[in-house]
Amino acid sequence: MRCPFCGSENLIWDFATGAIICASCGSVIDVIYEAEPPYHRLSYKKASVAEAVLYREKTRLSKQRLSLISMRTAMYTKIARRIRKNRVVNERALLAMLSGSQRRVRLIEHRIDELLRQRLNGDLAYLKRYLDIIDNDPVLSSRTFRGKVALAMMIHQLATRGSVDLKCIAKELEMSLTHLKRLEKLVLRRLRRLRV
Ligand SMILES: [Zn+2]
């Protein structure tokens, strides 16, 4: 099984929350469906209705015993232990996922993402209109938050000075030039298609 977003096979099966999470990009990939009660597999022994009800009730109660807080802590620790350098667990996304309000969330983000979100309401507010375009694009919208900010900076630079200053963006967003060159190729291809 691979992560459909980044292709990684580094997946966490978290039975406490019932989610399958990608340890590389933090996406919640799927939910773990409850295993068949054992009596289904034991064909030689047909379980009684009472046994079946008891089994279901036991499972339900053991699940309930894990409060949201302990689930959050367990999951936070589990993910934090496995993430790369400079990455943090986005607690807001984790809560949204655990409460069930959002199924597809990015649980892991870069250390500077939170600061970037704040800056979008400040000195980087001019990027918002480009981010809107990016979020509505079927290809560009799948990038990470930091990747999308980089794309927005590229579109802005193309619109204002006609070329992209990769070094400047690399420094500002702590991204590698290799990664940015890939994004630049992508954005140029998309812009040609959109004829922006
Ligand atoms: Zn992934």
Image (cartoon, helix red, strand yellow):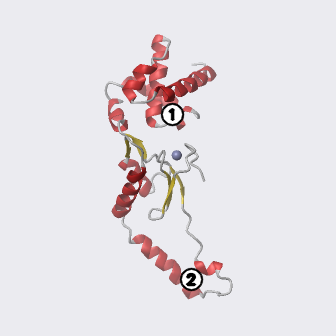
**Mark 2 Cα-neighbour bin, 10 Å: few <14, some 14–19, many ≥20:** some
Q: Which of 49 and 87 is in front in this view?
A: 87
Furthest residue to the top? 161
Which of the pair 92/85 is nearer the observer? 85
Cβ of mark 2 under 8 Å from ligand 1: the answer is: no
Q: Residue at label 1?
A: 135
The image position of residue 71, as x and y in percent, is 38, 62
Q: What residue sits 49% from the left and 13% below the top?
A: 163
The residue depicted at 61 percent of the width and 20 percent of the height is 192
The residue where tag 2 is placed is: 52
Q: Is residue 165 left or right of residue 195?
A: left
Percent across and percent down for residue 175 are 43, 30
* Any part of residue 130 in sight: no
Q: Which amino acid does label 2 sit on?
A: Ala
Amino acid bearing label 1: Asp
Q: How crowded is mark 1: few (under 14 residues within 10 Å), some or many (20 or more)?
A: some
Question: Residue 11, percent across and down?
Answer: 52, 53
Q: Disc 2 and disc 1: Cα gap in Å?
A: 47 Å
Q: Is residue 38 visible in this depiction of the protein? A: yes
Marks 2 and 1, the one that precedes in the sequence: 2
Say what secondary structure mark 2 lies in: helix
SS type, badge 1? helix
Q: Which residue appears at 58% of the width and 33% of the height?
A: 139
The quarter in which the C terminus is drawn is: top right
Give residue 168's quadrant in the image: top left
Q: In the shown orientation, is residue 4 left or right of residue 62?
A: right
Verify CB contact (< 8 Å) between mark 2 and mark 1.
no
Vertically, is 165 above or below 56? above
Which disc number belongs to residue 98? none
